[in-house]
Image: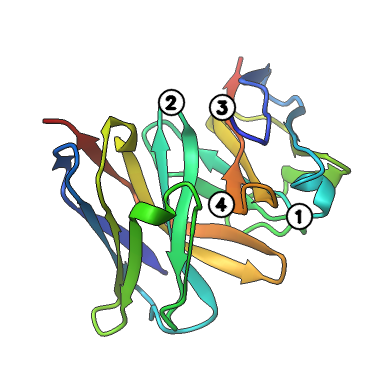
Amino acid sequence: QSVLTQPPSVSGAPGQRVTISCTGSSSNLGAGYDVHWYQQLPGRAPKFLINGNNNRPSGVPDRFSGSKSGTSASLAITGLQAEDEAHYYCQSYDTILTSWVFGGGTELTVL
Amino acid sequence: QLQLQESGSGLVKPSQTLSLFCAVSGGSISSGSYSWSWIRQSPGKGLEWIGYVHHSESTRYNPSLKSRLTISIDTSKNQFSLKLTSVTAADTAVYFCARGHVVPGTLWFDPWGQGTLVTVSS
């Protein structure tokens, strides 16, 4: 079980907006550590999507945005497209584990 | 653009040592303040950060693996490596190497290698 909790799955229709939550605690997100997000397409390696300052690498559309408040963070995807169907992971640091940690992942289905 | 490629033993017997290499191309492993990292993914445990090495050869390891782990860097070959001793079936996973971007107080991984499956079985 990860210290960062994500819903196992979310879904949305093309064009819609979906959000994926990442819930932590006072030892990670609540301690002020940034949250970063990754996208993993089927059979591929994870790909960096957005960092804690909402910076995206070139090639990642601005349909993807991140936010954080207290012990929770969210990834929002607007204008949902079929190509967005993937697993999404959050990542941060935990002071109790003294380790970089990932969420359990969320599978996004585009209906 | 920077690319990373894992290589090494795909099948390891229980109690033996897992050895992997990550070749970096398209850039120097010695430039910048990056943390060259290993991450693994297994069905049972999801993504797990293993550890990283800096070009200064300083390292940082996941405490849960520290007693069995060595990560080293070879700047002359532009590659870094992972050794994990006394492996068990729980170490079966896809192992990824990645470049870690270090900013005070945080770290993210970009890019990643394609990953290599390591199976621990007799």
Residue type at the position of mark 2: Gly
Mark closest to the chain's N terminus, 1 or 4: 1
Residue type at the position of mark 1: Tyr
Q: Secondary structure at mark 1?
A: loop
Task: Find residue A21 and report its horizontal and vertical position in percent.
Answer: 75, 31
* Disc 1 versus disc 4: nearer the observer: 1
Mark closest to the chain's N terminus, 3 or 4: 4
User: Looking at the figure, which quarter contains the N terminus of chain B?
Assistant: bottom left
Q: Chain of mark 1?
A: A
Q: Closest to the observer: B113 or A111? A: B113
Task: Find residue B68 and report its horizontal and vertical position in percent.
Answer: 34, 53
* Disc 4 versus disc 2: nearer the observer: 2
Q: Chain of mark 2?
A: B
Residue type at the position of mark 3: Ala
Mark 3 and 4 residues: CB-CB less than 8 Å, in contact?
Answer: no
Mark closest to the chain's N terminus, 1 or 3: 1
Q: Measure the C-alpha gap from mark 4 to mark 2.
A: 22 Å
Residue B104 placement: quadrant: bottom right
Q: Measure the C-alpha gap from mark 3 to mark 4.
A: 19 Å
Residue type at the position of mark 4: Phe
Task: Find residue A9 and report its horizontal and vertical position in percent.
Answer: 62, 19
* Disc 1 versus disc 3: nearer the observer: 1
Q: Closest to the observer: B68 or A30? A: B68
Identify the residue position indicated by label 3 in the image.
A82
Q: Closest to the observer: A69 or A78? A: A69
Identify the residue position indicated by label 1 in the image.
A33
In the rendered image, the vertical position of residue B66 relative to residue B35, given as above or below:
above
Q: Measure the C-alpha gap from mark 2 to mark 3.
A: 28 Å
Task: Find residue B88 and report its horizontal and vertical position in percent.
Answer: 27, 35
State the residue at coordinates (38%, 81%).
B28
